[in-house]
Every structure is written in C-alpha cells, then in structure tokens.
Image: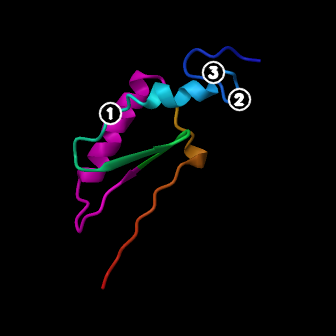
Amino acid sequence: MRPVRAGVPQGSTLSPLYSVYVNGILRPSTGVQLALFADDTALYLRSNCIGNILPRAIDELTQWLRLWRIDVNLEKSASIYFNHSP
C-alpha cells in the first residue's frame, strides 16, 4: 500500500466525493465545451476551424489539473477528430 498525497483513491469510501471535488473545474474560456461524467472529462468543439482554440482549452485544463494535483492517465486518454463534410 502506498500513501495518497492528493486526490481520492479509486474504490475508497471517499470515491463518491470525487464528483464534488472536480465540480469546481474551470470551464474553458475559449468556447470549447466541457463534459464531465464520473471520472471522465471531455473537451469538445464544433467549428469549421479549430486553430489554436482547442490547444488553449487543453492548456487551461492542464493548469487546473496541476493546481489540484490530479494526474491524467495517458494510457486511457484519447483525441478524436470528426470531420463532417456535406
């Protein structure tokens, strides 16, 4: 067993409090939408031009995660781009 210095260990009696913990997550100031479900977080944008909008939102989210000592599991993370052309 290892000590938990920040966050809530998965499966503990405090796990349901995780949603309260992340409820204060910053909403992106860039027009990008944020969706939270359990311990999943998604950023999404509907636009013809992504430009630097999405990377800026990711930077904002990264800063908030670092501030609150929340680690992102890169093995469970993904980026998906959908292109809808008529």
C-alpha span from label 1 to label 3: 22 Å
Nearest to viewer (mark 1 / mark 3): 3
Residue annotated with mark 3: 14
Label 2 vs label 3: CA separation? 8 Å
Image coloring type: rainbow
Relative to 31, is 74 on the left or the right? right
Q: In terms of secondary structure, where does tag 2 sit?
A: loop
Give me the disc on residue 26: 1
Q: Which residue is mark 2?
A: 11
Residue 82 rendering spot, x and y as whole percentages: 40, 69
The image quarter in which residue 64 lies:
top left
- Residue 9 image position (x, y, % from top left): 65, 24
Secondary element type, mark 1: loop
Label 1: few (<14), some (14–19) or many (≥20) C-alpha neighbours in 10 Å: some
Residue 48 magenta-highlighted = yes
Q: Residue at x 38, y 28 (%)?
A: 24
What stretch of residues is rendered in magenta? 43-69
- Answer whether residue 70 is visible to the viewer in this image: no
Circle 2 crowding by C-alpha within 10 Å: few under 14, some 14–19, many from 20: few
Tally the marks: 3
Q: Can residue 27 be seen by looking at this rendering?
A: yes
Q: Earlier in the sequence, mark 1 or mark 3?
A: 3
Identify the residue at image location x=30%, y=85%.
Answer: 86
Which x, y percent locates residue 52?
A: 23, 53
Which residue does the image show at 31% across and 57% down from the upper left? Answer: 45
Name the one closer to the observer, 66 or 38.
38
Q: What percent of the width, then of the height, locates residue 71? A: 52, 31
x 55%, y 18%: residue: 6
The amino acid on which the numbered mark 1 sits, given as a three-letter code, is Leu
